[in-house]
Amino acid sequence: MHKRAEQISTVEGAPDAPPRRDALVVLGMHRSGTSAMTRTLSLCGAVLPAEIMPPSAGNLTGHWEPRRVARFNDRLLHAAGSSWDDFFRPRALWSDPDALAEAIAGARELLRQDYGDNNLILLKEPRISRLLDIWRAALEQEGFAPAYVIMVRDPGEVAASLRQRNAMPDHKGLLLWVAHMLAAERGTRGARRIFVEFDRLLEDPQAVIDRVAAVTGLSLSARDAGAAAGIGEFLQPHLKSSAAVDFRKAALFAPVVRLHRYFLAKARMEPADDQVLDDTAAWMDDLAALFSPIIGELQVQRTGLHTAIRTLRQQLAVA
């Protein structure tokens, strides 16, 4: 369980003087509005990566994230015995100084490839929330002063969206939301950061961008005629489904309810009790201690079945 930080306000640590280079990093769980926030920020002047992941059936308006970074993050998680849909903490493979240095060097190279010499870049890839030990160091070593925009969406809506897109069980979607949000909060302490409600972005994007600009100290052109028109055209109601998993009556998920309330308070600049973070992390640690051995065994069995199927297919192909 991580140690509780001192009370942290929503608006944190804007520097006295502009940094040499800035990076706006959009964090949060998959299906939480990170793509919508990223595209909106790009229309305000922040630079997108050179090679963007194309739209998909699950996100027709685009992901707006670097394809190479997504692949790199998948490899990092795999090396740590994890994956994008693993709600337990990845094994700290990079606690080995050499492995950590290699991972940071790889991330730095991708930053150079995708952003060149640009001084205001925009980075979004949901796996980064779980890999901030690497990406925060890579950004800073490349001379960037990162500012983090952490998206807050109702976890019931996130779970419903994951069920529709990935046929994921609702309970798994809820736990993934918790894991990503705890990691994003923990990994951005001491940095410039802001929490943003997805609903608020859709309702009043200019107000949201004004707040992001105020927190980060960056010049964002949300009120320019061209930017405002582009944002209005992009942020349409269809970006958000009204479906949501009703989990709040289940006593087991009371920690998820409390964590969501905590992040809503942070996004609304209201008082928030940081003890919620420790309590939720402890709850997740208890779940991991109870269920990770069982899940690990099932994963081994699944891997064995996949290997057996692949072998049979190869044998049939040459028969």
Image (cartoon, rainbow, N blue to C red):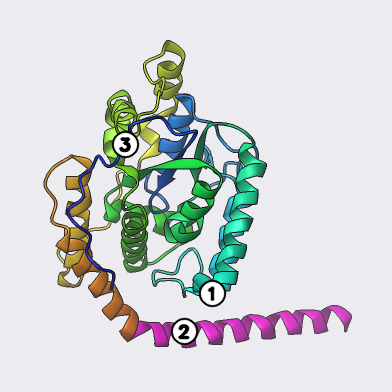
Q: Nearer the viewer, mark 1 or mark 2?
A: 1
Q: Residues within 10 Å of mark 1 (few under 14, many from 20)?
A: few
Residue 152 lies in magenta, yes or no?
Answer: no
What residue lies at 36% left-to-right and 68% top-to-bottom?
Answer: 172
**Near-viewer residue (41 or 121):** 121
Residue at numbered disc 1: 96
Q: Amino acid at mark 3?
A: Ala
- Say which label, 1 or 2, has the lower sequence index: 1
Residue at numbered disc 2: 296
Q: Is residue 315 above or below residue 240?
A: below
Q: Are marks 3 and 2 in contact (CB under 8 Å)?
A: no
Whole-angstrom CA distance, mark 1 to mark 3, is 32 Å
| The C terminus sits in image quarter | bottom right
Q: Are marks 1 and 2 in contact (CB under 8 Å)?
A: no
Q: Amino acid at mark 1?
A: Asp
Q: Nearer the viewer, mark 3 or mark 2?
A: 3
Q: Which mark is residue 14?
A: 3
